[in-house]
Image (cartoon, rainbow, N blue to C red):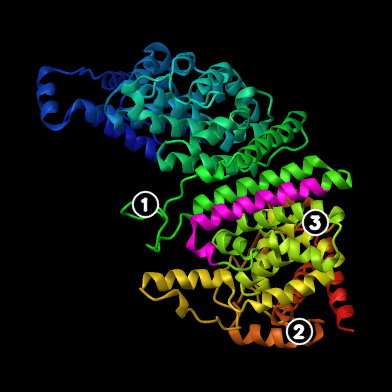
Amino acid sequence: MSFSFKLLTDTYRCLISGSCPQHSPADVAAVLFSSVCGLVSSTAEDVKVESEKQSTSELCCISLTVIDNMNLLLTQDTPGDVTLFFETCLIKLFRDMDVMTQLVHLFQTEDQIIRHLGAKCVSTYVVYHILKSGTVDAVWQQRCVEAFLSPVPGADLDSCLWSLTDVLKRLLKSSHQEVVRSLVSSFDSSLNALCSEFLPEGKKLFTSFPKTSSNHWETTFCLLLDLLEALTASGLRCGFSLPSQRLVHTRCPALLAVISGSSQYFVKKKVLLLLKRTVLQRSGEDWTSGEVLPNIPEYQQLDADVNVLAQTVLTAVEDDWLQSIEVKSVSFFGGTGHVGGDGGEEADFVMLRAVSLLLLKSMEVHVHWAGKPAAAAALDGAKEDYGYLQRLWSFLRRSSLELRNVTHLCHWVSVLFGEQDDDMVEAAKALLSIFQHHRPSSGLDDVAEQEAACASSCNPHCHFLLLLQSISFDHSILLDFLISAETCFLDYFVRYLKHVINDWQGFSRACQRVDKSRRPVALQQSVTRKSRTSGAECSSVQNPPLEPSGAIRLVDYDSSDQSESEDMDISEVDPATSVCEKQETAEATAFVKHKQYTSSECTGALTAVAPQSGQIPGCETSARALACLSELRAVVMRLRTKKLFPYNPSSLLKLLAQVHVCSQQSSN
């Protein structure tokens, strides 16, 4: 085995164990440099042995892995002698030998493994260097800027895009806001020039690239989309002070043109998901740390940018953009197929959810910025917004057989979003905002207003009841949502409770309407899919039992009010904290372990509560919904009494108590 391979193996093992290698830093740096450059600094005999056992590319891969681990090790807490040893190695490599120049040359290599390892090695060193010195590595920056200013889809541009994205992700994950601002600022002008080429303001996209690079365009464009999300995430956490952080908003027309154009299906899907996360202000939520900063001056620009994005989407919908969107069947190992005909293919619900949420949130932003218009303008606005919903419904019916069979239009939300709780809540919240905005100026009586809302799939009572139905009216799942780190459900739940208190008759009528539909749509959907897989007919689906199903929960809770020996572990928060301040205390998320409900316990609780709930006589939906809210109130009160709730639920309990009073008054 060659000397180089032995030395690199020993160095790698020391990196893993956190110890110093036997060789000197100079020897380690020399072997790493020669391996990266593809040179062999050993005797002819060593070359002969090495040519038989280890290729130059293998040594290069090992060297890149070692350098990458050095960079990672020095960003962690390590013993002083180990830190000093590997810092000396990096100084010799990057300052004395200028290995960065050799590393960025690897961006153009044909070997994809070496190219990726090289980009990864570069990004980890850039993060280490910028955190240590506060400056961006000049060689790497120059290479990336040159690639961005003269973009040609290919290996070099791909590596530059990936490395910059990786650097941003690592810095955002460690919450270095000032460093992120400095980094984005150094690339701001070149990034704007890059997007001018890939996402021009006109509708003729990608005409400036040579034909030889057209086959590689999809890969490069997807890497650009990843970078755009990282830039948007940096704006959410550090402030939207630079144009490059707002590229998704300002280049929205071009992105919509990609979706309706002739690009590959996976590219269209990736663009849609990017726009969905942007309008929801969730960019980078999977890999960033820290909360969005709503109070800094730069953040105020975000509201205007989101409004621009929303108006762009609504304008595109008016121009029949939805009709140009391609929807295939759900992906599987054999690929995908087009939806249509009588083949019974299941539509790609990920695509449909993204389109629906993008439009619904755009409408919500639109009505938020519209404020409180005069009666005539409000009536025109209502017709316009309900027109958007009708266009969306037509698109969904065309794309999905399951949605085509929906008779009560409010059901489509639970059918489409039944597998994605957070998206369902966002959709319900958007529809609630739209309904509340137009309700004061509708000029209709209560009954006609409810009929119009259901005809436009915009009845908030139906959405809430169908949400409860999709979780089998299990209050413990609602409790899971309330104590999670996400505040979306809490916001929606509080707003809906305020609405139902002021519109109890509308709630009662919605219960009767939902009760007529014997099959809970969200549960029927899962059973239907299962029966399709086994070759059964959809018509053979039976009504589900009344007992709560065995839904998967984050936590489980005992139904006994007398239990004093709960085995719970919830971070305690100051009781003075209000419900609206939950986001500030989201870190105190509950971790609760408790006994699971049995069907008999749930049924018993329902039987005990229902007669006192003031439900509509003979209306099962009303009984189960009010029982669910009553049980939720009891559990929250019990947890608050024992100081086990992660925030102060006083406002929430007050609303639940008012709901209980309304139910009692309606039964008298």
Q: Which residue is mark 2?
A: 609
* CB contact under 8 Å: marks 3 and 1: no
Give the label, 3 or 1, closer to the camera: 1
**Type of amino acid at the residue the image marks with label 2:** Val
Quadrant of the rendered structure where residue 86 is?
top left
- Residue under the point 70% across and 84% down: 605
In front here: 245 or 457? 457
- 481 left or right, relative to 654: left
Element at label 2:
helix
Percent position of residue 567, x then y: 64, 72
Position in image of residue 335 (x %, y %): 34, 51
The mark closer to the camera, 2 or 3, is: 2
Q: Is residue 656 visible from the viewing direction of this image?
A: no
In this picture, which residue range is highlighted in magenta? 379-405
Give me the residue at 48% from left, 73% from top.
527
Residue holding disc 1: 336
Number of other residues with Cα within 10 Å of mark 1, as a class: few under 14, some 14 to 19, many 20 or more: some
Name the side, left or right, on which 202 lies relative to 334: right
Residue tagged by mark 3?
A: 579
